[in-house]
Image: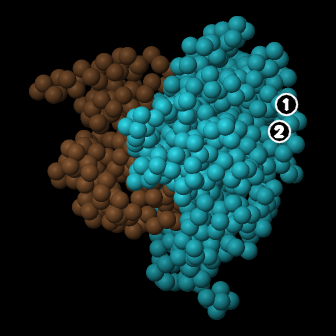
Amino acid sequence: MTETVSMFSIVKEITSALKDKPGALLPILHDIQNALGYIPADSIPIIASELRLSRAEVHGVISFYHYFRETPPGKQTIHLCRAESCQAMGSKKLEEHVKDKLGIDYHETTADGRFSLEPAYCLGLCSCSPSMQIGEDVYGRVSNESFDSIINEMETLS
Amino acid sequence: MTVIVYVPNDSGALALGAGRIAAAIEKEARQRGLDIKLVRNGSRGMFWLEPLVEVEIPEGRIGYGPVQLKDIPGLFDADFLNGGAHALKVGPIDEIPYFKKQQRLTFARIGLTNPVSLEDYLSNDGYRGLNNALAMSGADIVKQVTDSGLRGRGGAAFPTGIKWNTVLNTPSEQKYIICNADEGDSGTFSDRMVMEDDPFVLIEGMTIAGIAVGATQGYIYLRVEYPHAHRALNTAIEKAYQAGYLGEDIQGSGKQFDLEVRLGAGAYVCGEETSLMESLEGKRGLVRFKPPLPAISGLFGKPTIVNNVISLASVPIILDKGGEYYRDFGMGRSRGTLPIQLAGNIKYPGLVELAFGLTLRELLYDYGGGSASGRPIKAVQVGGPLGAYLPESQFDTPLDYEAFAAIWAVVGHGGIVVFDDTVDMAEMARYSMEFCAIESCGKCTPCRIGSTRGEEVIKDIIAGRDLHKNIPLLRDLCDTLLNGSLCALGGMTPYPVLSALNHFPEDFGITEQASAA
């Protein structure tokens, strides 16, 4: 109950702070996702009424962009690059290993809620492929072994 | 005496551990009671040497790289702070041939300075272009850009001056400058480097554009995948405001220019300029029909310049040294320099800024050193995921917009992704269609449906089913995408697909017998 109330107040606060910006919808969605980790379905009517849009329009924008998510993410979201430069350096094998190690596919979250896995189509780290990003931390020349040690280190820290 | 030590803060270097190296060097110096000043510079763009640590001594800036955590005590033992000998020592940075042979105009400052220091920017020729521009008429500024021969570096290579001139001559109370910083092409990272490693040059370029055409508002549409660039840009923008380089009265000229960074949300198609503007307006990134041109009716229906990061970042030097200076570099109708990015399976990956005209072979072998795996290079993809795959027989093509067009390829944003002989080109073609299907905005049918059907057909081909039917079907489908798509996403996906098919038919199971039949 309190969670829902605080969700509503966060969404209201963000929306009313930004709604007068030209083209406010994306900045609003970003701030909501930064604050809550995702964009709850219940927030759509609030955003829609503040911006004088239909709920369908807001939903349409959320679903158009790969980055916006409508379900809570794991504690850490791993963005693994699938693009050509990383493929040229063996990212497909790494991808298999990552999925196997975490036991999930893309767009899924591990059962313990620690990790979500998302594909990225280029992180701009093509000079050190294959690459991945976890939060704001970037990793280059990732191997199966270095992936394991990064993940193990995170699990120890948490 | 305080020794200045440089450890890059570029995310390419961070991805290889530069953050930890910087912290470890500070700690080790403290423990040894040594007086150092750590500067987080940008990257020199020689990524096989990253993390590249530099020390400033009277002989110049001496590099050590690639430095790992375990190397740090040894570096101190070897007195690297005074340029001491060590296995990782690469000597004076300026003398490394890969760096020395480059013609850095747009990237002149990158790697030298602390990117978010306005003082560093000003003491390294920063804002000289804007100062000149403030004393010129809009038409004269546009003329310099036109004279420079600069063409859109984002990929389409449209003459920048002509675009600016259209906006200049379209009367409107409000005009906009948009920087397209949605650099989503695999193999490209020059935009990212500019934004992280020299953000003021982009701000200056956009300010000049605004003053030239009478636009008072600028937006940098930045992809969300670049959090480090986001931070650097916002820091630099804030400093520019504080110092009067942005805002209502730029350097007392009475001219106004405001600038804001807006984040994308992981849609590749938003790198297409009309889709980008829809996104900036807060909508789904659906591609618009053209005409009207954005220069006449763009963002919120107003005249808008949409330029790529590198195009805008090249403007300050043009206004500083003159259009002719810039035009003197290059070949044919490709004038100036191009920051080329060597990526993928290559021994010496990095950023190489050179005048147009070098051949691919020179880039791949003289600069790139061949493949990283040591195996023969089988194919390179130039210009991102919508660029053609080139086989070895085309490696003598000079980097020039027209020369590439003549072999049905594109220079694009100057990214070169290298593949060795283990690559399966049919699989790469399948991936191109898959990527198009994932990223299609869905507005036009050839792209929306064609990409999905395309992937299915290529899967059938890979499985060896009915090649005599499926190969012509794939070609026919590509023809529809090429000629019937609204924008370059659907319109150019056939480039990687058909070039893979044409140059590497054996990977598609086509034997000489079959193709004769």
Coordinates of residue B182 in the picture (x, y in percent): 55, 41
Q: Are marks 2 and 1 on the same chain?
A: yes
Q: Is residue A17 shown left or right of residue B187?
A: left
Q: Nearer the viewer, residue A142 or A6?
A: A142
Residue at 34 percent of width and 63 percent of height: A145
From this viewpoint, which residue is outermost toward the left? A1
Q: Colour of chain A?
A: brown
Quarter of the image for residue B374 reads bottom right
Is the Cβ of the residue at disc 2 closer than 8 Å to that at disc 1? Answer: yes
Q: Amino acid at mark 1?
A: Gly
Judging from the image, mark 1 belongs to the subunit labelled: B
Residue at 85 percent of width and 41 percent of height: B327
Q: Which residue is mark 1?
A: B322
- What numbered label is drawn on residue B326? 2
Q: Colour of chain B?
A: cyan
Q: Nearer the viewer, residue B116 or B469?
A: B116
Coordinates of residue B32 in the picture (x, y in percent): 41, 38
Q: Is residue A125 visible in the rendered structure shown here? A: no
Mark 2 → mark 1, Cα distance in angstroms: 7 Å
Residue B144, compared with residue B256, is above or below; it is below
Coordinates of residue B478 in the picture (x, y in percent): 61, 65
Residue at 43 percent of width and 45 percent of height: B21
Q: Is residue B468 shown left or right of residue A105?
A: right
